[in-house]
Each structure stands twice: as structure tokens, then as C-alpha cells.
């Protein structure tokens, strides 16, 4: 059994979608980051950077923070959604790291300045909206060349999709990015994505563009 510490955010949903895809038994433990649960000393022992997601795998005794590390761990544990070696493995890691280093942090800034703190800094709003659209363009070009971010459906797609599902609050129109839209809708139709989206609770439906 895996204890999975999470909340209703893109970083949490990456791991719930992965757990649903690989069908490992887990228990979701809600960490309400709006109420400050992430600063609880017991949680900090598992996640020293006071962020969700985190897991404790009682089969192995391994405890992990950081969604990218957790996705790689679960892929290695199950032998699924990341090739074991070779160029195909490195393609997955390349696009996973692109999510971890660019898509998540930059789109997170869009949420902070444009969605939660609108009107406080026009400079920051414009900067992150522009970067947001640029990153959508990078993903759109990649997905114009192939069906998934790496060769097959993988943890790179699972890491990226929950951030694109926030396109309404990022003020992005998926019609401007037709390849990204095609990929987004394909993943949105996967039962494991739909199950993972409502962990630890169902607060909203998956946004579906016209
Ligand atoms: N790089 C981390 C980022 C995790 C992260 O930013 N989590 C947010 C929610 S999406 C959080 O827990 N924020 C609480 C806080 O910063 O106090 C990962 O990918 O796991």
C-alpha cells in the first residue's frame, strides 16, 4: 500500500493519474494547502519543502517528495510508462524535465499573477501570459510531429496534462494550438485520467474545450 499525500492541484493530479494508470493500491491523504496542512511537522518529515505531492511506499519503506521523482519511481516499480533504457527512455526524461523545469514553474506563475492576484502587477501578468503561450507553442509543435510527447504515452504526458487542464485560468485558447488540443482531448478521455482528476476529492469537472 502507498500513502499518497495530495491536494486538488496539477502537481497532485500528476501522481493520482499515474497511480490510476498503473493500478497500484494507494490511500490518498488530503493535505489542504489553503489551510496550511503542508506546514504540519509530521508532513514536513515526508516532504521537507512543504509541498504536495509526496508518497510513502510501505512495500519498500521509500518516502519521496517531488512529482517528477515520484513518477519515475512508480514507472520503475511497475515497469510501465517509461522505457527501461535507450533513446526512448531519454526522450521521456527529456520531456518530463521540460515539464518540471519550465511548464510547471512558469504556468504556476501565471496562476499566481493572472488568476489569484490579477491587477497587482501588469508587468508580471504580461510576462507570464507571454511565456505561457510560448510554452503552449513548444508543446503544440512537438505534438504536431508525434502523438505523444515522447514515443509512446508516458509519464511525460502524465506530468504535463494536468497543467494544460488549467488552460481557462491561464487565459489560453486551445484552438490556437490544434495539436495540443488533440492530445489534451485524447488524454481527457482516458478512464485513469478521469479517475485521477478527482483525487482527493471532486472539486471540478475536467474542462473540455468546444
Ligand atoms: N516541484 C514540486 C512542486 C510542488 C508544488 O508546487 N506543490 C504545490 C501545490 S501544486 C504546493 O504544495 N504548494 C504549497 C506551498 O507552497 O506551501 C513538484 O513537482 O512536486
Image (tube, rainbow, N blue to C red):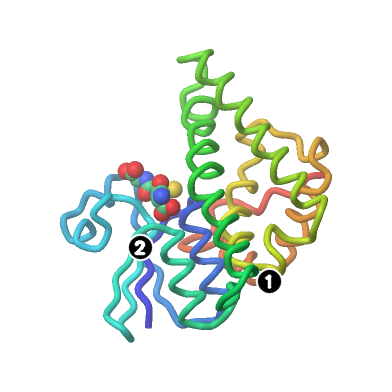
| SS of the residue under disc 2 | strand
x%, y% of residue 166? 61, 43
Crowding near the residue tagged with mark 1, few <14, some 14–19, many ≥20 C-alpha atoms within 10 Å: few
Question: Which dot, 2 or 1, sits closer to the camera?
Answer: 2
Depicted 129 relative to depicted 12: above or below: above
Which residue appears at 48% of the width and 67% of the height? 71
The answer to which image quadrant residue 29 occupies is: bottom left
x%, y% of residue 83? 60, 75
x%, y% of residue 114? 54, 26
x%, y% of residue 69? 42, 63
Answer left or right for 124 relative to 47. right
Mark 2 and mark 1: Cα distance apart in space: 23 Å
User: In terms of depth relative to the viewer, which is nearer, 139 or 28?
Assistant: 139
- Circle 1 residue: 191
Depicted 73 relative to depicted 129: above or below: below
Which residue appears at 47% of the width and 69% of the height? 72
Answer left or right for 179 relative to 105. right
User: In terms of depth relative to the viewer, which is nearer, 40 or 65?
Assistant: 65
User: Residue extending furthest left?
Assistant: 41
Answer left or right for 6 relative to 191. left
User: In terms of depth relative to the viewer, which is nearer, 190 or 137?
Assistant: 137
**Ligand 1 neighbours mark 1 (CB distance < 8 Å):** no
Crowding near the residue tagged with mark 2, few <14, some 14–19, many ≥20 C-alpha atoms within 10 Å: many
The quadrant of the image that shows the C terminus is: top right
| SS of the residue under disc 1 | helix
The quadrant of the image that shows the N terminus is: bottom left
Q: Earlier in the sequence, mark 2 or mark 1?
A: 2
The answer to which image quadrant residue 84 occupies is: bottom right
Counting the numbered discs, the total is: 2
- Circle 2 residue: 54
Which residue appears at 54% of the width and 52% of the height? 203
Amino acid at each position: 500500500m502507498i500513502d499518497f499525500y495530495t491536494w486538488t492541484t496539477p502537481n497532485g493530479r500528476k501522481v493520482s493519474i499515474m497511480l490510476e494508470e498503473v493500478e497500484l493500491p494507494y490511500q490518498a491523504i488530503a493535505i489542504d494547502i489553503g489551510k496550511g496542512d503542508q506546514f504540519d511537522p509530521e508532513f514536513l518529515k515526508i516532504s521537507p519543502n512543504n509541498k504536495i505531492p509526496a508518497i510513502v511506499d510501505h512495500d519498500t519503506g521509500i518516502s519521496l517528495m517531488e512529482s517528477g521523482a515520484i513518477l519515475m519511481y512508480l514507472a520503475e516499480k511497475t515497469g510501465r510508462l517509461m522505457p527501461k533504457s535507450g533513446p526512448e527512455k531519454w526522450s521521456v526524461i527529456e520531456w518530463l524535465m521540460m515539464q518540471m523545469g519550465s511548464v510547471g514553474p512558469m504556468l504556476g506563475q501565471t496562476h499566481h499573477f493572472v488568476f489569484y492576484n490579477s491587477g497587482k502587477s501588469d508587468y508580471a501578468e504580461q510576462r507570464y501570459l507571454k511565456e505561457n503561450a510560448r510554452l503552449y507553442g513548444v508543446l503544440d509543435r512537438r505534438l504536431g510531429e508525434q502523438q505523444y510527447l515522447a514515443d509512446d504515452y508516458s509519464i511525460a504526458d502524465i506530468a504535463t496534462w494536468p497543467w494544460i487542464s488549467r488552460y481557462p485560468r491561464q487565459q489560453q485558447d486551445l484552438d490556437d494550438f490544434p495539436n495540443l488540443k488533440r492530445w489534451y482531448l485524447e488524454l481527457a478521455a482516458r478512464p485513469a485520467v478521469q479517475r485521477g482528476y478527482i483525487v482527493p476529492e471532486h472539486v471540478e469537472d475536467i474542462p473540455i474545450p468546444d
